[in-house]
Image (cartoon, helix red, strand yellow):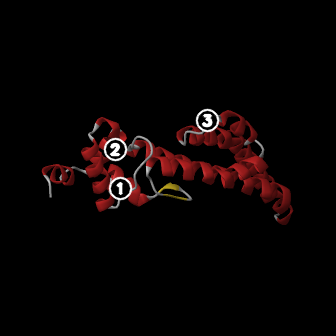
Amino acid sequence: MTDLEELWRSRTDEQLLEAFSALEEYSEQGQRVIHAEFVRRGLAEPTKKPITFQDALAVRTLHRRFIGSVCAQWLSLIFLVFLGSYFPRSVDAALGLLCVGVFVITWVLVPATGYKLMKQLEVESPGPLAILMCAPLFSLLVLIGIRSFTARWSQEHGVAVDFLGPTKQDLARLGGGDAI
């Protein structure tokens, strides 16, 4: 093992990711050693600069908030349209008012959260999609389609994601520990 290989083995994952983001600044031999260390550790090589823990946590939080608000929007709409007639009149009025309130709140929350999530996922023009999300049908379609934006973001930053955004394991790897 060369001194250079030994040096990069002693570096942390974060230091290795930082070096990879500025790979062109290293000699050809240094680039080979950095690539070899990535392979040895089983790390995914990002195509962009490394993502911070705070950025990955923000994506995960926005994913959860977006999913929850779209579900609340649809549940309130379904209740208002289909289930309201199954309850006694006094309960029906109270639940109907509650559902209208939830629907109005989600009418604002869904596009706002969707816009923030798409900005965090580095989508080029999230504004038009966010405006369309005021309509429940489009918010559901965006919820289904957001997976493609997340997959692209995940590949670019080397962060594993599931339906709720960055995985707990990758957040811990990025520096969040077990507190997530």
Asked which secondary structure carries label 2, the reply is helix
Which residue is at 40% across, 40% downward?
49
Residue 82 position (above or below residue 130): below
- Residue count near mark 1 (Cα–Cα under 10 Å), binned few <14, some 14–19, many ≥20: some
Instruction: In the rendered structure, find residue 20 and report the number of the disc placed on it.
Output: 2
Say which residue appears at 78% left-offset and 59% top-offset: 91
Q: Position of residue 166 (x, y in %)?
A: 47, 54
Q: Which residue is mark 3?
A: 124
Task: Name the secondary structure under disc 1.
Answer: helix
Give how far apart the Cα atoms at labels 3 and 2 are.
25 Å
Give the label, 3 or 2, closer to the camera. 2
**Quarter assignment of residue 117:** top right
* Near-viewer residue (49 or 117): 49
Image quarter of residue 28: top left
Q: Residue reaching furthest front? A: 28
Pointer 1: what residue? Answer: 172
Measure the alpha-carbon separation of dots 1 and 3.
28 Å
Task: Give the x, y percent position of residue 114.
Answer: 63, 42
- Left or right of 115 on screen, residue 168: left
Q: Amino acid at mark 3?
A: Glu
* Residues at marks 2 and 1, CA–CA distance in whole angstroms: 20 Å
| Type of amino acid under label 1 | Ala
Q: Residue at x 69, y 38 (%)?
A: 130
- Closer to the eye: label 1 or 3: 3
Question: Relative to residue 163, is residue 72 drawn left or right?
Answer: right
Location of residue 160 in the rendering, given as x and y in whole percent from the top left corner? 46, 57
Of residues 161 and 99, the one drawn nearer to the viewer in this rendering:
161
Q: Are marks 1 and 3 in contact (CB under 8 Å)?
A: no
Q: Is residue 137 visible?
A: yes
Which one is earlier in the sequence, the residue at label 1 or at label 3? 3
